[in-house]
Amino acid sequence: MEKINFKGVEAVLFDFEGTLVDFQWDLKGAVQEVLQRLNALGFPVDRLQGKKYSILKNQAMAIASEIGQSPEQVKEEIDSIYDRFDADALLRWSLRPQAKEFLSSLKTSDIRTGLVSNVGEKAIEEGIKKLGLSSLFNILVSRNDVRHLKPNGEGIRLALKSLNIAKEKALFVGDSIDDIQAAKEAGLRVIIILGGENPRPDLLSGRPDFLIDDYGELITNLKEDRR
């Protein structure tokens, strides 16, 4: 893959879980609990079996309309479950090496930053405060700010609109297939850092623009491009 070039870049958007912090979310447990709740509400859960947590929420909201239930009520039911799994992950999150240094380097370079995460607002705000990142973001977009989670590009488009930055002048940093798909849908080049939600072979199948092992690579490239 080609070298990451920061010349002309005005904003860098980030995923959170698995990207800036280590991956701690109990994906399997959350999906099982949501399916149990939807079954109790009369949903045809056979249509939702095998779906990952992000797709599960999006599709459950679509099915709600089909069976005469309120998509917004279903969204609230699922969000309340996901909120508890957010809180559980928050207890264990720790920063990935040099993540804070890279964010600080972006700020020093007058490159704006944003967070676009499937994690809920409460846990995101508590997490970045706990980790000393609050002053390093210009915009936060959480699960509560969008109707559709990543892999939908809605959150990324919302962040760019809020920052008033063209997609051609922004990069997205993530760790998952969902991040790749969301960034590509929104028209951004995507940098994937290994060691998060998805293994390397799956990530390569998504064809990210850049694949890195750690933030040290980004810090080096940014310094070289800003000389």
Image (cartoon, rainbow, N blue to C red):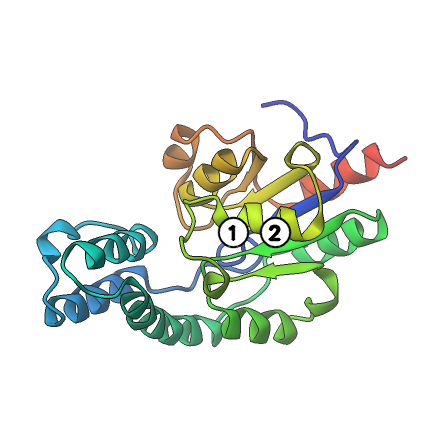
Residue in view at x 54 percent, y 68 percent: 124
The amino acid type, in three-letter code, at marker 1 is Gly
Q: Looking at this rendering, what residue extends furthest in the right direction?
A: 227
The image quadrant of residue 177 is top left
The image quadrant of residue 29 is bottom left
The amino acid type, in three-letter code, at marker 2 is Ala
The span from disc 1 to disc 2 (Cα, nearest Å) is 6 Å
Q: Looking at this rendering, what residue extends furthest in the front direction?
A: 68
Across and down, in percent, residue 6 comes to 75, 34
Label 1's element?
A: helix
To which residue does mark 1 refer?
155
Q: Are marks 1 and 2 in contact (CB under 8 Å)?
A: yes
Answer with left or right where residue 181 lies relative to residue 189. left
To which residue does mark 2 refer?
159
**Dot 2, crowdedness within 10 Å: few (<14), some or many (≥20)?**
many
Residue in view at x 43 percent, y 49 percent: 150
Across and down, in percent, residue 69 comes to 19, 65
